[in-house]
Amino acid sequence: MKLNLMGTEINNYTFEEGVNKGIELMNSNKVSQVITINPEMFKEMEHNQEFKQIIEEAEMVIPDGIGIKIALKLKGQDCTRIAGIDFARRLLEECAKNSDSVAIIGSKEEVITKAVENLKNEISGLNIVYFHNGYFNDNNEIYKDLAEKNAKLILVALGSPKQEFFIYNAKKILQNCLMVGIGGSLDVWSGQVKRAPKIWQKLGLEWLYRTLSQPERLKRIFPTLPLFLIKVITYKKDK
Ligand code: UDP
């Protein structure tokens, strides 16, 4: 089932359903894009028509972050929050089980190197055939490498909206793969950033934990979140 938030369709899956849908797309002969949507992306959509288009065309849009859950609730819709980092991790495990190849792009060199090392140690059989840091000038060079390596799962951590554009353009070149924008996940997998303890996650307070441990994020959350919720409440369909 699909939910609708200010004209944007969001898939409503349980975590397991979402993972299964991801696996299905990965095993199809298509090239697909997964967007883990948050309030900041809605802000970007307001003035970036191309970005809006990318989200509309994505094969899967899942609600990442409590902001989207609250917004949907305000509109009388219930959804399960699927954290992009958990979703991506499950897909990595699935690839390892089936010996499917994986490529990862993004973050600083030392961060991605450490994240790849940790992931390989933690997920037995994980086959990472390609990785590259996220600070490059020519997308085409990376697309060329990706086309050669032919990985089934491609995780892209360039922050938003950069990663969504990178993936969208890659869709025109690559085949048979699933690409997911994973934001700051490599920072967590490398051990550089600590994730909130499970209980904070369960209570929907991961954003608070992240803000307390990285206070510079505060200016990203405020006033974005309250303004976003006001927009959601006052949204009129044919505006
Ligand atoms: N990043 C990158 N290239 C860039 C800009 C950002 O690889 O040109 C990386 C950055 O190092 C970080 C991630 O993208 O690892 C962005 O994380 P952020 O916390 O902004 O993601 P989000 O809050 O969207 O999850």
Image (cartoon, rainbow, N blue to C red):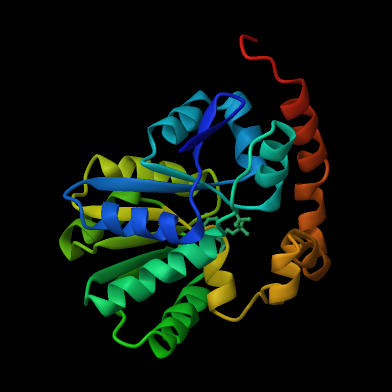
Q: Quadrant of residue 183?
A: bottom right
Q: Quadrant of residue 94?
A: bottom left
Residue located 40% across and 60% down the image: 19
In the displayed structure, does residue 63 sit left or right of residue 222?
left
Percent of width and height locating residue 85: 53, 65
Percent of width and height locating residue 110: 51, 78
Residue 92 in the image: above or below residue 23: below
Residue located 50% across and 29% down the image: 52
The quadrant where ligand 1 appears is bottom right
Residue 131 in the image: above or below residue 55: below
Q: Can see residue 132?
A: no
**Quarter the C terminus occupies:** top right
Residue 117 in the image: above or below residue 45: below
**Quarter the N terminus occupies:** top left
Q: How many labels, in total?
A: 0
Q: Can see residue 213?
A: yes
Percent of width and height locating residue 196: 71, 72
Front position in the image: 224 or 94: 94
Residue located 71% across and 77% down the image: 197
In the displayed structure, does residue 71 sit left or right of residue 79?
right
In the displayed structure, does residue 7 sit left or right of residue 50?
right
Percent of width and height locating residue 80: 59, 52
Residue located 55% across and 53% down the image: 159
- Residue with the most extreme top position: 238
